[in-house]
Amino acid sequence: MARNTTRRSGRQERMAARAAKGALAAPFTIRKIGKVSLIDDEAVAIIERNADRILDEIGMEFRGDPETLELFKANGARVEGERVRFDPGWCRDRIRTAPSVFTQHARNPARSVQIGGDAQVYAPSFGPPFVHDMENGRRYATIEDFRNITKLHHQLGAINHSGGVVVEPVDVPVPVRHLHMAHTHLTMNDKPLMGAVTAPERARDTIEMCRIAMGREFVDKNCVLYSVVNTNAPLVMDETMLWALKEYAQAGQCTVVSPFVLGGAMSPVSVAATLSQVLAEVMASVALIQLIRPGVPAAFGTFFSPISLRTGAPTFGTPEGTQFQMCAKTLADRLGLPFHSVGGLTASKVPDAQAGYESQAQLMGAAMAGVNFIIHATGCLEGLLTTGYEKIVMDADRCSAMQRFVGGVDFSEAAQAMDAFFEVEPGGHFLGAQHTQDNFESAFWMGEMSDNGTYEQWHAEGGLWQHERASARVRKLIDEYEAPAMDAGIREELDDFVARRSREIEGDDT
């Protein structure tokens, strides 16, 4: 039987009003509840001692850059070939110059975010080569998909960041792909963005494009880019990541050191051992950032997924993944660094129940632990091989709920509502009370994607499952998208920069 997709006009208007309010939501969340840690002082001492021993007796390799090795050696580290060893406490001493809290400025100042402290920032997934939607299924992503997904995140108030490689647009040649992605972020979204890390010249291009969009002097004095470099676990920083790290550090931009670890393959098969390894890799790498430019922003990042020891495939939404994340946050706090980690990860191939419960488990762990920058908060399918259009708006709803949750309970005089008790007689109801009338729009969290009506109402409106409602919302958001304002001269200069650099990269001087 064909489903009727007609909506009642009153309900449409209410949803549109809530969506408009969401688009103007706070640029980040200040959490007002305590953090949940799964690691006590004794365990912290064990992990830190083991990390120090790893760095002292085994060391970490920094490959492909003699200049970095010389910098380490000149500052007292022990260098042998590309292996660098550190006396206990050496890395911590250098890390102390990194700020515990900083601002990443957006092109629109109202969208700038705080990184660190009690702030939480929710950001899109990063890196999938595929996209999925309910109409067309799974396919390779294109630049049109990249732009559509950027349009969605611009309008979703629960998402505080434009992100980076929200998908890989495979129809754009790799050498110039970063230009088109940065151009999209800067022109189609005015929230903060992430920088390219796949080559030093791509990092330089991204920095230069931000200088065009936001002013050279401003960019040279402020953090406008937030870029993630992954160590090549175990205990290696390869030359590609190392060169990107150097470019951003020299330019005064934030670099997140996020070891990419598949537990059991790239680390031992225990949370405790993986924590020691990750702490060692982060400390050595952030120490390098501070040697390059003391005081430049840096963050402690993690990406940890256990593998199935039966199949070798990564697993998501597992207890161990959440345990690791909640322990690592405590280690980051001990170093005085903002903490970056993952949100709504799932191995599911479609936006089904598995996708929902796995993503919610990881997102709740991040929210409870106090993760400062939650990447992969929206869109993840198939273990980050795919970004799902419907999954983006479904996940954004959960991010909104988490933001309300960590915002704490309001105990203000207005929230105590004593006038309402005197207004309503015993045995009466509060629906008509003045306090209810004054607060009904904001009193309780209301999601965009959950259907809380009766069965009869749901059936009369088409009997749509959540992924079907999400599909309709995606189309509506894309159709109604309006680009953020940008000075015409700046837009022309950005366009010219992309065209010129594309010619230079592709060897066409015409």
Image (spheres, helix red, strand yellow):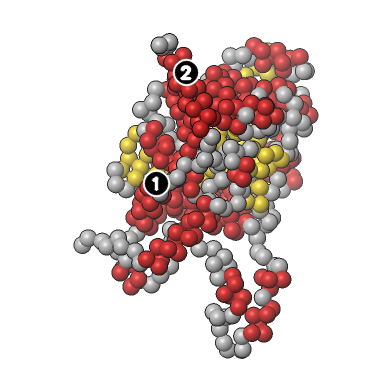
- Location of residue 281 in the rendering, given as x and y in whole percent from the top left corner: 64, 29
Residue 495 visible within the image? yes
Q: Residues within 10 Å of mark 2 (few under 14, many from 20)?
A: some
Q: Picture coordinates of residue 117 (x, y %)?
A: 70, 45
Residue type (three-letter) at the residue carrying disc 2? Arg
Q: Is residue 141 left or right of residue 309?
A: left
Relative to residue 143, is residue 373 depicted above or below? below
Q: What is the CA distance from the residue labelled 1 to the residue labelled 2?
A: 30 Å
Answer with the quarter of the image where residue 5 lies.
bottom left
Name the residue located 45 percent from the left edge and 28 percent from the top edge: 180
Q: Is residue 359 visible?
A: no
- Which residue is pictured at 34% across the width and 64% down the height? 7
Vertical placement of residue 427 versus 183, above or below: below
Helix, strand or loop at label 2? It is helix
Please give the name of the residue rendered at 65% of the width and 82% of the height, measured from the top-left corner.
Answer: 421
Instruction: Name the spot of residue 479 as percent of width and height, x first.
Output: 37, 47
Q: Quadrant of residue 168?
A: top left
Q: Nearer the viewer, residue 137 or 393?
A: 393
Which residue in the structure is indicated by mark 1?
478
Frontmost of labels 1 and 2 is 2
Which numbered dot is residue 500?
A: 2
Relative vertical location of residue 33 with respect to residue 380 in this rendering, above or below: below
Mark number for residue 409?
none
Mark 2 and mark 1 in contact (Cβ < 8 Å)?
A: no
First in sequence, mark 1 or 2: give its number: 1
